[in-house]
């Protein structure tokens, strides 16, 4: 078991900075006294964390209140001033493209067309307006075109010239 304070803290923290959670090379690591020694903070592990030297220097002998302020101001994405944490934070995965609402619309359109039995729209124009009428709150031209396109790409609808046939 490591016995030096820094080694112990690094071990407990899994080798990452207490604040920014980035892998912390030993050369960059330092022991931060949460309650600064100047304010009466002790050297016990309870009062110490291992962190980037840069943030340690920044926090210096701030009061606990001020340190909280600094941490909270980072709004959950703490980046130490040396920027080690920035690369990963920037690579934060974006929410996947929102295909779901369109899929729901497509399902709605297909269900409606099925219900129509033999009285389905026979031309592209009437199909488009029928699809449009399914969305009383309105649907953008682009969404409408995308839906008609999806009907074709899923093989539910075949458009030949202006005529439309169905595989429903
Ligand atoms: Zn850090």
Image (tube, helix red, strand yellow):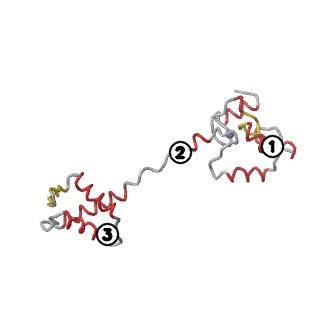
Q: Is mark 2 within 8 Å of ligand 1?
A: no
Real-space CA distance between mark 1 and mark 3, rounded to the nearest whole angstrom: 60 Å
Q: Please tell me which of labels 2 and 1 falls first in the chain.
A: 1
Q: Secondary structure at mark 1?
A: loop
Side (left or right) of 141 relative to 20: left
Residue 92's disc number = 2
Q: Are marks 2 and 3 in contact (CB under 8 Å)?
A: no
Q: The C terminus is located in which quarter?
A: bottom left
Residue 163's disc number = none
Q: How many marks?
A: 3
Side (left or right) of 29 relative to 132: right
Real-space CA distance between mark 2 and mark 1, rounded to the nearest whole angstrom: 30 Å
Side (left or right) of 158 relative to 11: left
State the image quarter where residue 41 is shown.
top right
At 17% from the left edge and 56% from the top edge, which residue is drawn? 159
Q: Establish if 7 lies above or below 121.
A: above
Name the residue tied to disc 1.
60
Q: Nearer the viewer, residue 124 or 136?
A: 124
How crowded pointer 3 is (Cα within 10 Å; few <14, some 14-19, many 20+) is rated as: some
At 20% from the left edge and 55% from the top edge, which residue is drawn? 156
Q: Percent position (x, y) of residue 79?
A: 66, 44
Q: Establish if 99 lies above or below 118.
A: above
Q: Please tell me which of labels 1 and 3 falls first in the chain.
A: 1
Name the residue tied to disc 3.
135
Side (left or right) of 77 relative to 118: right
């Amino acid at each position: 078991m490591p016995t030096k304070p820094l080694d112990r803290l690094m071990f407990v923290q899994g080798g990452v900075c207490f604040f920014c959670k980035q892998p912390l090379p030993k050369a960059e690591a330092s022991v931060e006294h949460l309650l600064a020694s100047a304010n009466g903070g002790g050297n016990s592990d309870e009062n110490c964390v291992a962190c980037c030297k840069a943030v340690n220097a920044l926090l210096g002998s701030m009061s606990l209140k001020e340190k909280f302020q600094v941490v909270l101001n980072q709004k959950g994405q703490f980046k130490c001033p040396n920027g080690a944490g920035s690369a990963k934070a920037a690579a934060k995965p974006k929410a996947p493209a929102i295909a779901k609402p369109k899929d729901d619309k497509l399902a709605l359109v297909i269900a409606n067309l099925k219900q129509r039995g033999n009285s389905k729209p026979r031309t592209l124009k009437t199909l488009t307006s029928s699809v449009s009428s399914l969305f009383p709150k309105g649907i953008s031209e682009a969404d409408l075109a995308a839906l008609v396109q999806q009907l074709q790409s899923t093989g539910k609808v075949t458009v030949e010239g202006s005529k439309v046939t169905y595989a429903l």
